[in-house]
Image: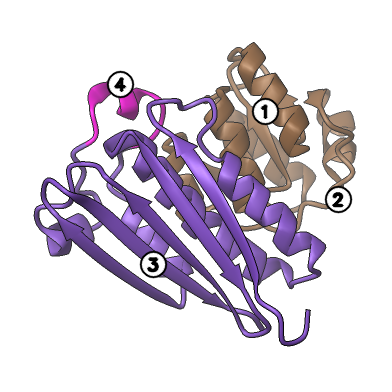
Chain colours: A purple, B brown
Amino acid sequence: MSGNTLHYHYVVPGDDFTRAGMASSAVKQVLKQLGLDPETVRKMAISLYEGEINMVIHASGGEIDVDIDDEKIVAVLTDHGPGIEDIELAMQEGWSTASEQVRGLGFGAGMGLPNMKKYSDYMNIESKPGSGTTVTVMVNIK
Amino acid sequence: MKVKELCAQLGWEIANGEGEREITGGIYCCDLLSIVMGRAPAGSLWITVMGNVNSMAVSTLADTACVVIAEAMPLDDEALIGAKKGNVTVVRTELPVFEAALKAAECLGLL
């Protein structure tokens, strides 16, 4: 794919935990097919899945745009949910506003955003309470 | 050691997949999926009591060698569909998590 940029667009349905992870799985499949090294694939898969779950839990879904070129994979996750009041607080491990129902499924441990930061090479959050959140994550291709 | 070899030695049931993957990441035990996602090593034998569809997604994306459902906890229909779709090897045992990990560790020569 020398010199080309591949673009993929996914819609993440809200409040459907059985389908959460479909976009991340699809992206993982694409990255594997491109022959990228397993650690790069894993980093992007984990970062995206956490973002996807956050969209389902907090924002009634959203959209994911993924661009892949020779050097990097960039994913932009956009939702129109309630936004994040305090991004610094949300980035702390263990801090979560998830419901008891969500916790019963094994989520809501306050690890989503920290995991995204841990597994990506660059991460940016833009959020306004009331109007939604856009998270950008980038993983360098080795 | 491959997942299927470990299962054969311990008498654990393979509920989905062939178990052809090598266990290269040791053993990892946790039920909280957000923690598993961030900390389970790739290629690990992941032991949990969470037999739901989200566990299957986590195994796929965190790239564990398999999921071991301990305590004979049920693997629901959605989870089984998710496992097939994600090509996840799912193993079931009646043992509690600690005992399952101990047996697996003995088998893998980790003790």
State how far apart marks 4 and 3 are (Cα).
Answer: 28 Å
State how far apart marks 3 and 1 are (Cα).
Answer: 27 Å
The circle on residue A101 is 4
Q: Secondary structure at mark 2?
A: loop
Chain under callout 4:
A
Same chain for marks 4 and 3? yes
Q: Which residue is mark 2?
A: B1
Q: Which residue is mark 3?
A: A136
Q: Hey, what amino acid is under mark 3?
A: Thr
Magenta-tinted stretch? A98-107
State how far apart marks 2 and 4 are (Cα).
Answer: 38 Å
Left or right of B36, for residue B41: right
State how far apart marks 2 and 3 are (Cα).
Answer: 39 Å
Left or right of A55, for residue A87: left
Q: Are marks 3 and 1 in contact (CB under 8 Å)?
A: no
Residue A89 vertical position relative to residue B73 in the rendered view, above or below: below
Q: Secondary structure at mark 3?
A: strand
Q: Quadrant of residue A36?
A: bottom right
Reply yes or no: does residue A99 show up in magenta. yes
